[in-house]
Image (cartoon, helix red, strand yellow):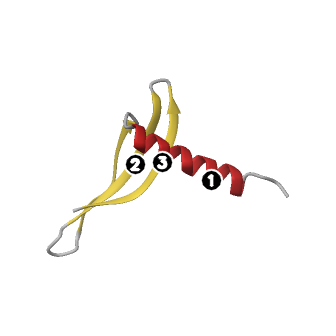
Amino acid sequence: MKVLTSFLKVKSVEGDRITYTYSEIDETTGKVVSNNNRSNFVILDKTLSEHVNAIEQWITENKLIED
């Protein structure tokens, strides 16, 4: 099975891109088959884009505003 280990949203010329890493685990033994596998995609789905924008807005409002 594949287990997501991290992801990052990046602004690129093509549009917002999600890059992510994952590990592959043998479902029977639990042994790590491979790790630090990487892939990415451009966000084309409107609903996904709205979710990413909501996360960015929350970070801006809750973590970037100085007291």
Considering only vertical position in the picture, is 6 above or below 39? below
**Pointer 3: what residue?**
51
Res 6 → quadrant: bottom left
How packed is label 3: few (under 14 Cα within 10 Å), some, or many (20 or more)? few
Q: Secondary structure at mark 2?
A: strand
Q: Residue at coordinates 46% horizontally, 40% vertically from top-left?
A: 49
Considering only vertical position in the picture, is 38 above or below 44? below
Nearer-N-terminus badge (3/1): 3
Of tags 2 and 3, the one toward the viewer is 3
Q: Are marks 3 and 1 in contact (CB under 8 Å)?
A: no
Q: Residue at coordinates 55% horizontally, 51% vertically from top-left?
A: 55
Q: Amino acid at mark 3?
A: His
**On the rendered image, what quadrant is the C terminus found in?**
bottom right
- The image position of residue 11, as x and y in percent, is 53, 33
Q: Are marks 2 and 1 in contact (CB under 8 Å)?
A: no
Horizontal arrangement in the rendering, residue 55 relative to residue 33 (left or right):
right
Q: Residue at coordinates 40% horizontally, 48% vertically from top-left?
A: 20
**Pointer 1: what residue?**
58
How packed is label 1: few (under 14 Cα within 10 Å), some, or many (20 or more)? few
Q: Secondary structure at mark 1?
A: helix
Nearer-N-terminus badge (2/3): 2
- The image position of residue 65, as x and y in percent, is 77, 52
Q: Amino acid at mark 1?
A: Trp
Q: Amino acid at mark 2?
A: Tyr
Q: CA distance from mark 2 to mark 1?
A: 21 Å
Horizontal arrangement in the rendering, residue 48 relative to residue 2 (left or right):
right
**Pointer 2: what residue?**
20
- The image position of residue 23, as x and y in percent, is 31, 59
**On the rendered image, what quadrant is the N terminus found in?**
bottom left
- The image position of residue 2, as x and y in percent, is 26, 59
